Amino acid sequence: MSTDRLNLPQLQTRMMVNALRSVRVGGSVVYSTCTLSPTQNEMVVENACALARTHYGIKAVERSLKKMENRLTNTGLFQFSADCRRGSLLLPTLLSNFGPTYVCKILSKRWLKYAICPTSTEDEAGQSSEKGASSDNEVTNKTTTTTTVISCRNDLIEK
């Protein structure tokens, strides 16, 4: 497995944290993938919500998609996974012409008064760096890059 593929959950987590930082209180973020991997699905949601709370004081909660599941007509082309703890995982049957689809809706409930917010400091070499929880420095250091990738997505696809 390539390094890029192994790093996908970290990239997805950073993208979701940035999305949660961008949405207003009461707004929602819909996270969707086309993989069966719990690491890229439920773990990304759990990690992003935990990082958003710890580092940015954002309380984000998952919204149930059971109503959506109940409204979809059962054509026999798909079923929903019973093993999915967060969000919904749509599993196609062999007759279907599509892959699996994971969807999770996250609601930004409120900004908390406390957070371990990253602060910019200069290290001994005079380079600017961000400080926060040591386990999440990579996420806070790459926030700007991820935001750029998200905002330039159409440009990347056209090349």
Image (cartoon, helix red, strand yellow):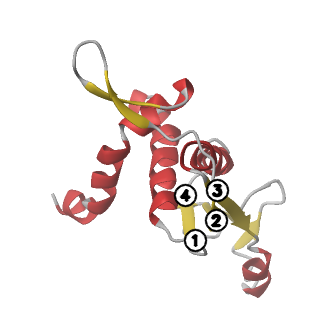
Q: Are marks 2 and 3 in contact (CB under 8 Å)?
A: yes
Indicate the secondary structure of the residue bearing disc 2: strand
Q: Which numbered disc flags the more N-terminal residue, 2 or 4?
A: 4
Q: CA distance from mark 3 to mark 4?
A: 32 Å
- Whether residue 93 is visible to the viewer of this picture, yes or no, is no
- Is residue 100 rendered to the left or right of residue 1? right
- Residue annotated with mark 2: 110
Of tags 3 and 1, the one toward the viewer is 3
Of tags 3 and 4, the one toward the viewer is 3
Among all residues in the image, which is located at the extreme top?
124
Residue 38 image-quadrant placement: top right
Location of residue 64 in the rendering, given as x and y in whole percent from the top left corner: 76, 71
Residue type of the residue flagged with mark 2: Arg
- Whether residue 125 is visible to the viewer of this picture, yes or no, is yes
- Binning the other alpha carbons within 10 Å of mark 4 as few (below 14), some (14 to 19) or many (20 upward) gives some
- Residue annotated with mark 1: 25
Residue 67 image-quadrant placement: bottom right
Residue under the point 57% across and 49% down: 52
Residue type of the residue flagged with mark 4: Cys
159 and 55: which is toward the camera: 55
Q: Which numbered disc flags the more N-terminal residue, 2 or 1?
A: 1
Q: Are marks 2 and 1 in contact (CB under 8 Å)?
A: yes
- Residue annotated with mark 3: 112
32 and 57: which is toward the camera: 57
Indicate the secondary structure of the residue bearing disc 4: loop
- Residue annotated with mark 4: 34
Residue type of the residue flagged with mark 3: Leu
